[in-house]
Amino acid sequence: MLKIKIQIYCGEEIAMGPGKADLLDAIVSEGSISGAGRKLGMSYRRCWLLVDVMNRCWDMPLVATSSEGARLTERGRAVLQDYRDLQARVDESGTPGWVALQCRVRAEPLAAQKPEPS
């Protein structure tokens, strides 16, 4: 099984990755950072820290907060869509590199590697 994880960096910070994209999806569906955290089984603090990183890493904030909750900004919706589109293209299993790698990778690792000859 092949699974490619796309991470977009801003300096040393991960500006977008699978977990952050899932958090943005949860904010859309739940309408708040705390609701998104409950949905994903994450603490409010952890979610808030992830939102803070995203808002600081992109040219415009991805999430807007108010006393009524949280929502994705126009930039947030665009970045999330672009990221999901990129994931979909990378996950296309028909590409030659994907097929070649899938044919070569083991389903499970060997119990032990052969010792190197002396």
Image (tube, grey):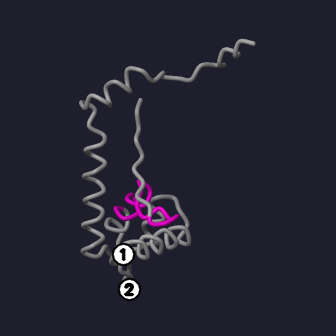
The numbered mark at residue 66 is 2
Quadrant for the C terminus in the image: top right
Of residues 11 and 73, the one nearer the viewer is 11
Q: Residue at x 25, y 44 (%)?
A: 89
Label 2 or label 1, whichever lies nearer to me, is 1
Provide residue 26's location: percent of width, then percent of height: 37, 63
Query: Would you identify the image quadrant in which residue 2 lies?
Result: top left
Q: Residue at x 51, y 58 (%)?
A: 41
The numbered mark at residue 31 is none
Residues drawn in magenta: 10-25
Residue 70 drawn above or below residue 29? below
Residue 18 drawn above or below residue 53? above
Provide residue 56's location: percent of width, then percent of height: 43, 76
Residue at mark 1: 63
* Amino acid on which the number 2 mark rests in the picture: Ser
**Residue 93 lies within the magenta run:** no
Which residue sits furthest top?
117
**Residue 19 lies within the magenta run:** yes
Provide residue 27's location: percent of width, then percent of height: 37, 68
Residue 87 drawn above or below residue 50? above
Of residues 48 and 43, the one nearer the viewer is 48
Q: Residue at x 24, y 74 (%)?
A: 74
Q: Is residue 34 left or right of residue 115?
A: left
Neighbours of disc 2 within 10 Å: few (<14), some (14-19), many (20+):
few
